[in-house]
């Protein structure tokens, strides 16, 4: 019986090894396929020249809209005198304008390369535009997150300290044992 169990275990190991060897190429192939499809999307290989130009025009317009929206958010933060939010949004604005400029320049260069019928330069500028658009959309989302992070804590912060225990030495510092210390009503802003 012991030999039978050992034979069964070795057969199970062999079967699992064979299955894992059979599945490895599938995993590698699917990873390569997803990398290839991402590269095709970024290069625009599957797009016509007109589709590339349309994508470029839409990308530039989207980034311009994101800049306008961010400027409105900055204006609102200025009106609310929210300096933390304002700093966060201004940081994103500088980076977003850089992505906007890169996409605009790439759109122009793509059109110029298309006029010269230089397919390599068209693909190069399409890639630059694709990356600039992706980065710009990420920055726009980060600017929205600035509002969410800062905007969730309106008003002034108030601290209440609870002191547990204490002995005779606590009395020297003006703290009664097992008491709650709150600010005076005169210092309360609300």
Image (cartoon, rainbow, N blue to C red):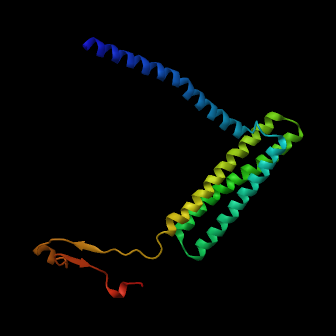
* Circle count: 0
Query: Farthest residue in the top direction?
Result: 3
In the rendered image, which quarter is residue 174 located in?
Answer: bottom left
Residue 72's place in the image compared with 172, above or below, is above
Q: What residue is at 36 percent from the left and 84 percent from the top?
A: 187
The quarter of the rendered structure image containing the C terminus is: bottom left
Q: What residue is at 80 percent from the left and 37 percent from the top?
A: 121
Q: What residue is at 71 percent from the left and 36 percent from the top?
A: 40
Residue 91's place in the image compared with 23, above or below, is below
Say whether residue 71 is left or right of residue 169: right
- Camera sees residue 43: yes
Residue 65 screen position, x and y as percent: 72, 61
Residue 54 screen position, x and y as percent: 81, 49
Residue closer to the observer: 71 or 172: 71
Residue 189 screen position, x and y as percent: 41, 84
Say whether residue 21 is left or right of residue 38: left
- Camera sees residue 109: no
Residue 18's place in the image compared with 135, above or below, is above
In the rendered image, which quarter is residue 117 located in?
Answer: top right
């Amino acid at each position: 019986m012991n030999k039978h169990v050992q034979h069964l275990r070795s057969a199970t190991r062999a079967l699992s090894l064979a299955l894992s060897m059979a599945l490895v190429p599938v995993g590698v192939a699917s990873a390569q396929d997803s990398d290839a499809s991402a590269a095709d999307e970024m290069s625009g290989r599957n797009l016509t020249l007109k589709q590339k130009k349309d994508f470029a025009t839409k990308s530039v317009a989207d980034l311009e809209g994101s800049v306008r929206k961010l400027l409105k958010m900055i204006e609102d933060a200025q009106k609310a005198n929210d300096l933390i939010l304002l700093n966060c949004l201004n940081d994103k604005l500088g980076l977003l304008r850089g992505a906007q400029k890169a996409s605009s320049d790439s759109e122009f260069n793509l059109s110029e390369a298309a006029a010269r019928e230089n397919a390599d330069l068209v693909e190069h500028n399409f890639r630059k535009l694709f990356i600039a658009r992706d980065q710009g959309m990420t920055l726009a989302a980060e600017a929205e997150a600035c509002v969410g992070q800062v905007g969730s804590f309106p008003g002034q912060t108030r601290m209440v300290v609870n002191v547990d225990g204490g002995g005779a030495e606590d009395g020297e510092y003006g703290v009664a044992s097992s008491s709650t210390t709150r600010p005076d009503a005169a210092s309360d802003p609300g």
